[in-house]
Amino acid sequence: MDAMRENLAYLIDQRLYESAEILGSFLISAAGPGSEVSAISRAENLVLYADALFGRQEYRRALNLYRQAQQLCKVAGHAGGSTRTVPGSPATVASAGLGNAIQSGSYSAGVRLRVAECYVALKEVKPALTELEAVPHRLRSLRLNLLLARLYHSSSYDRAALAAYKECLRQCPFAMEALAAVAQLGLSAKETCALLPQQEPLPSTPSSRGGGKAAGAGEVHESCRWLQKYVEAQAHRTANENAASLDEYQQLVSRFPNNVHLHLHMGQVEASQGRNEEAMIHYQKARTLDPFNISCMDDYALLLLSRRSPSSSSALPAPNLQAWVVAAVLWMSKGERGSAMAYVEKALQLDDHHFPALLAKGAILLHADRSETAAVAAAAAAIFRRAYTQKQDLRVFQGLVRAYLRIPKLKEAIAAAREAVKAFPNSASALSLLGEVYLQHGDSRDKARKVFEAALRMDSRCGAAVTGLADAHSMDGRHAAAVDVLERHLAVDASDWIHVKLGFVHMAANRLPDALHHLQTALSINPSNENAKRGLNRIDKLLKGGDGDEEEEEASLQYGTGGPLFE
């Protein structure tokens, strides 16, 4: 019996779960209730067998066996027997007797952790929390505390989550997930740094659990400065102090060149404030360093879609959360809104708070047919409001403003645009959102034009300001001025969208050859551009003596209709 048990534990340690399950079935049947095997040994056998089932992802079966083992441990009392205990996993061999481990509670804590992990795998959060909370604080391992913190965080129990994450950092200051989470939950950099060691901790010393002494009064060991710098970068990012955050990250990159994680974070910060080109540089650098990395690649795919080149991101493995979002983006680029929505829903089924998935779903809804505009735009606004609760990001404000304009809810649109300007005071794209709202008021076009001009003074390459100013000129009949604005921008951004805008402006001025040239150029860049196809159809009608669809022309001149996903 002991040989079977030892070999079962060995198979589990080697992750040979199929063999372990078969051997475990023999062990359990040899130590049934009618045998002379003690209750403690039967409990240990059940836990080992459950570990094998857990490894095979048969969580419901494993949960049932863990429960049986818990009941046996309750009636075992002070009985001795095996020589196995559970510092981190019920299958770990140790020198102390299992009876002593049960009496101290360490074995029960390990089993409760496994029970909670089964519940998490089955997406049953409440019973998982109940199991973890039943473990005394002195017996909570780092692994247990981190799982508890994640569950609190996902359940919006922010105060409890913060306390659990802080306990993780006391146990291991290099728990990087916890460092990012406490910043997201609002803990200041100063408070977080107080939890960190002042000298580099070693695993075998007390300082490895956050209790080490400082190298000197007020001194920080050089090898730990980078960790504090990382904490400060995260805190600045949460506070929306993007320039300071990027500066901290850049200092870290100078010490840790070619760090994929840092480039991904810098890309996220740049994308959140609408600096898409800068974000692309960091994502491309990360992809060059590690072509098989999937973290943040769904956000990268959204940026690629705004440039109409999503196929560059098509090498991600599937199925997983990021890959579903990328698949949705690829279908969006082909104009297949139904297929895109199906894939983004798969992503949200895995994590209904996943930020890129929420952005993608909102964008799909914004690109609905005009016959569905009012109802679908309201649904898009609801999705962007959900994304807003995750983090402040300029793309969320852009989605909110455009959804409100299509409902239409001008009061809410202008409130969202003003909040964007307040959150991103140095962003020309944020200021352009305000101009976009003013453009919808017939008596506010002069104000809109001034806002777009101010945005271009901030950033002459801002596409939203360029197309917005062109729209303002076109709506007032100043087609030559609109063409001049767009053609100047064409030198720095020869995208299909700019060619479409030029095509419609030339069409409005009855310069059909020029309109035909730009619309055909747009289609050569992006064959799935629906606005370019509609424009060519209208030119065909005009050349045949028809009057075209003036209402469609006016709608297509408005910025955002069929334009880039996000500026």
Image (cartoon, rainbow, N blue to C red):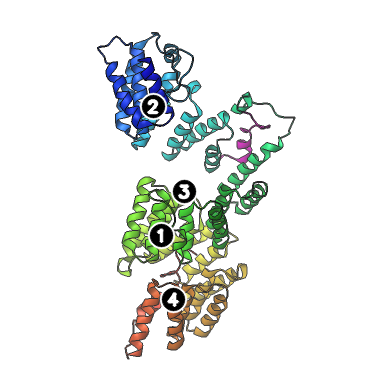
Q: Is residue 426 above or below residue 65?
A: below
Disc 1 element = helix
Residue carrying label 3? 390
What range is drawn magenta here?
186-202
Residue carrying label 2? 131
Disc 2 element = helix
Residue carrying label 1? 329
Q: Earlier in the sequence, mark 3 or mark 2?
A: 2
Residue 34 image offset from top left, x and y in percent: 24, 12
Q: Is residue 25 above or below residue 379?
A: above
Residue 354 image offset from top left, x and y in percent: 43, 49
3D distance between C-alphas at marks 3 and 1: 21 Å
3D distance between C-alphas at marks 1 and 4: 20 Å
Front residue of this view, candidates 329 and 449: 329
3D distance between C-alphas at marks 3 and 2: 28 Å
Residue carrying label 4? 524
Q: Earlier in the sequence, mark 1 or mark 2?
A: 2
Residue farthest to the bottom, as pictured: 545
Q: Is residue 99 above or below residue 490?
A: above
Q: Indicate whether residue 192 is drawn in magenta.
A: yes
Front residue of this view, candidates 441 and 350: 350
